[in-house]
Image (cartoon, helix red, strand yellow):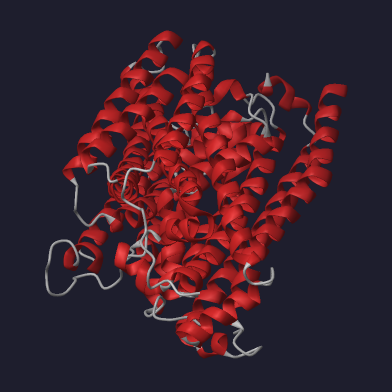
Amino acid sequence: MTMTDFTSTLGQPNAVSIGFFFLFVAATLVITYFAARKSKSASQFYAAGRSVTGLQNGLALSGDYMSAASFLGIAGLVALKGYDGLIYSIGFLVGWPIIMFLIAEPLRNLGKYTFADVVAYRLSQKPIRVAASCGSLMTVAFYLIAQMVGSGSLVQLMFGLPYEAAVVVVGAIMIAYVLFGGMLATTWVQIIKAVLLLGGASVIVFMVLAKYGFDPSNLFAFAAEKYGDKVLAPGGLVANPWDALSLGIALMFGTAGLPHILMRFYTVPDAKAARKSVFYATGFISYFYILTFIIGFGAMAIVGQDVVTKIDKGGNMAALLLAEVTGGTVFLGFIAAVAFATILAVVAGLTLAGASTFSHDLYVNVFKSGRATEEDEVKMAKRGTIFLGILAVVLGIAFKGQNVAFMVGLAFAIAASANFPALLMSILWRRFSTFGATVSIATGSVLAVGLIIISPTVWVDVLGNAAAIFPWKNPALISLPAAFAAGWLGSILRPEPDAEERYEQQKIRNYLGMGAE
Amino acid sequence: MTAEASRHLDETAFRELVRTKWTISLVLTALILGIYFGFILILAFAKDVFTIKIGTHMTLGLPVGLGVILSACVLTGIYVFWANTSYDASVRRIIRSMRGK
């Protein structure tokens, strides 16, 4: 097949895609309308009344995690680099077993709405809530900026809509979901999006494999004959072993420290459902990464690297071009609408997590010392939603055209260094004290942010200096162990006998689920 | 409620439960860490291993990479299976004996 005469309709308003997009928005807004009646109490607003099943939460978790950037970005990376794209996917997957083995069940049994509930379970509320909120809000903010900027450019590429308009549309619909429908609507948006994305990607893969006798090895062989055997072998992605190790640590433990992921475990009725949901999520996400790998090779073999780079030099349009070549304009419209829906769902999840931190951790437990009425708490969460939604739009526009690729890495580095160590130590270590936790979170955040600023990703790529002060692109190899060490040292220097006594009660609730919310 | 109930806790059984849970969790954590960082270290130091041909074009790296993905699913599956059968049963036994006394 030759693609030299192929001209894509990408970037032109596509009636089918606009139709599918309106259908998605209409359906999710109807769900939001019904969810709104059930989102009056705090437990309903933050945790969907703990009524979500394991399978539903597994889909919603994968919906939260499978961003448009990972769908379009990884498919593009594979289309241009081949095997290296797989290495990238694997890094994003291996955090899920860590969530399962170390975090999911204790989190569900000990917490209420946010992960700070667990860290603060037997420690002094105010210092822990303030520190944990900083870690949480920074993670959410950087992740959100990266998503908004990415979505603006993607929508521009897909629909030809101006960048600013795209960011405002995403912000407005996302605020509507979270503000009116709370966690219940957000969960269903995630579930629908996950089903559409997995379904759409499966159809692309089916049509690609149909051309190769349903044998992936024929596809790989064809791509290797066209672009050389190097596409089936590792290239330059892992050049510096320390850098690779550091990024690996950030991805592995950062997943277990992402507030919008952790928050989802409060939507299920008990620890058993929490554990099931991680298993489903791991399965769905694995399947998704295998699909994107085949889609990337499909784009390489069928569309061709030259056509892919002509539309977007980063390769981000590879999956969409492949959809157009294999299924025509109608199918392109469907997949583009799914990609847009994906963006909406991820930013909704992030905004809800940020609003919960804002209201439950800061307003109720710090400002009101835990003595706020439920109505006040929900009201503040809704104000937080509007504030964060508008902030996301403003920052999305402010960072237009900037290099924000480092922000996802930064979000994972902060999550791995500020959130994960404190969470794990509070679950596992009797002698963990308020001082230790505060120092650990502060050390983790300051080192993660500080080191990334003087690293090649910001110091050279963004600020334009000649050489970086800190040699690795990701700081987690330093900042994560430092956060554990600071937590240990702080707890030894200022022990807290009361908290140690309360650890026995915490254990009973943690392992037997007695008294869990 | 927990404070009152905990007075009837079967300390030995509970300690055993917690110890088994963390043994399983930490062994599985070590396995996934070993598999993933093993994969990364081979990429960093012995990349040539993954370019070894196992077919006309197919390299060893491809099935190994897919194997890492599969191992994440299998290990979480093992944990869920163990927790659903053994752990949950022990928890039920301990709670029953607390209520019984």
In front here: A354 or A323?
A: A323
Give the vertical position of A335 relative to A33 (above or below).
Answer: below
Residue A342 lies left or right of residue B73; in this view the side is: left
Give the vertical position of A14 relative to A483 (above or below).
Answer: above
Q: Where, quadrant-wise, is the N terminus of chain B in this rendering?
A: top right
Number of disc labels: 0
Residue A13, image x and y in percent? 33, 43
**Res. A34 image quadrant:** top right
Residue A31 lies left or right of residue A3; in this view the side is: right
Q: Residue at x 39, y 73 (%)?
A: A305
Residue A306 lies left or right of residue B16; in this view the side is: left
Q: Residue at x 63, y 30 (%)?
A: A268
Residue A379, image x and y in percent? 37, 13
Residue A127, image x and y in percent? 34, 33
Q: Is residue A346 visible?
A: no
Q: Is residue A183 visible?
A: yes
**Res. A510 image quadrant:** top right
Residue A34 lies left or right of residue A173; in this view the side is: right
In front here: A472 or A284?
A: A284
Q: Residue at x 37, y 58 (%)?
A: A8
Q: Where, quadrant-wise, is the C terminus of chain B in this rendering?
A: top right
Q: Residue furthest front?
A: A5
Residue B62, image x and y in percent? 59, 77
